[in-house]
Amino acid sequence: MIVATIAFYVFASIAVASAVMVIAARNPVHSVLFLILTFFNAAGLFVLMGAEFVAMILVIVYVGAVAVLFLFVVMMLDVDFAELREGFLQYMPFGALIGFILLLELLLVVGAWTIAPEAAALAASPTPILTDVTNTEAIGRVLYTDYVYYFQASGMILLVAMIGAIVLTLRHKEGVKRQSIAQQVARTREQAVELKDVKPGQGI
């Protein structure tokens, strides 16, 4: 128990500190690196809770895909940090107003938060029973039975978003050779192969 308590405080303190640095760092690359560190420490907290599947998803999906994608995009962009810092004081009152509104909404949510009477019973008897199956199997059973339509809908939304991003960023330029799958499939032997009668002692 002592080791688990020490590990919890180490992971929690590093996660909170790195999360603060995500928004406090002036360099966007440093912010993404601190974000990756936050994800790793959050995964450690999930492991301590016994949710190893959620921890692996957090590392594989968020660190391995999302955060690395953010890092590559930020590094490939020609960002002028001096230009970004210009006009910071001009937008500070507007940003402070938005932050105050969000803080007020969070306080209202926390103040009106009530725990349902059946919450204790649901926590005591989860579906399915965790003593019979593993965490991964339990999540799979609930996800692909009770929430299968929501899961499929979220997949369709992501697919549409991906197609929309490709369409918006697709640019056609003149003079650029592009691959045409239909033309390649429709090619015949006569179009693809040309026979040359090379005489002895001469080149092609």
Image (cartoon, rainbow, N blue to C red):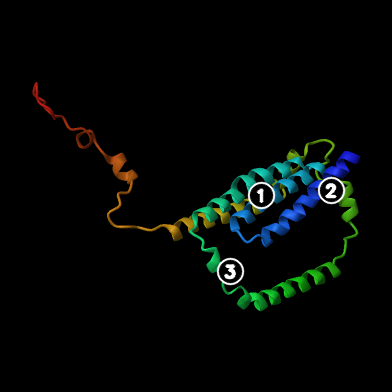
Amino acid under disc 1: Ile
Give the numbered dot on residue 36.
Answer: 1
Q: Is residue 171 left or right of residue 184?
A: right
Q: Secondary structure at mark 1?
A: helix
Q: Nearer the viewer, residue 8 or 143?
A: 8
Going from the N terminus, do you reach mark 2 or mark 3 first?
2
Q: Residues within 10 Å of mark 2 (few under 14, many from 20)?
A: few
Residue 39 visible in rendering? yes
Q: Quadrant of the N terminus?
A: top right
Q: Is residue 167 left or right of residue 184?
A: right
Going from the N terminus, do you reach mark 1 or mark 2 first?
2
Q: Is residue 50 left or right of residue 178?
A: right
Give the x, y percent position of residue 116.
Answer: 88, 60
Q: CA distance from mark 2 to mark 3?
A: 35 Å
Q: Nearer the viewer, residue 133 or 98?
A: 98
Give the x, y percent position of residue 164.
Answer: 49, 59
Q: Residues within 10 Å of mark 3 (few under 14, many from 20)?
A: few
Mark 2 sits on what residue? Answer: 9
Q: CA distance from mark 1 to mark 2?
A: 19 Å
Up-down relation of residue 99 to residue 200 (above or below): below
Give the x, y percent position of residue 67.
Answer: 61, 50
Q: Secondary structure at mark 3?
A: helix
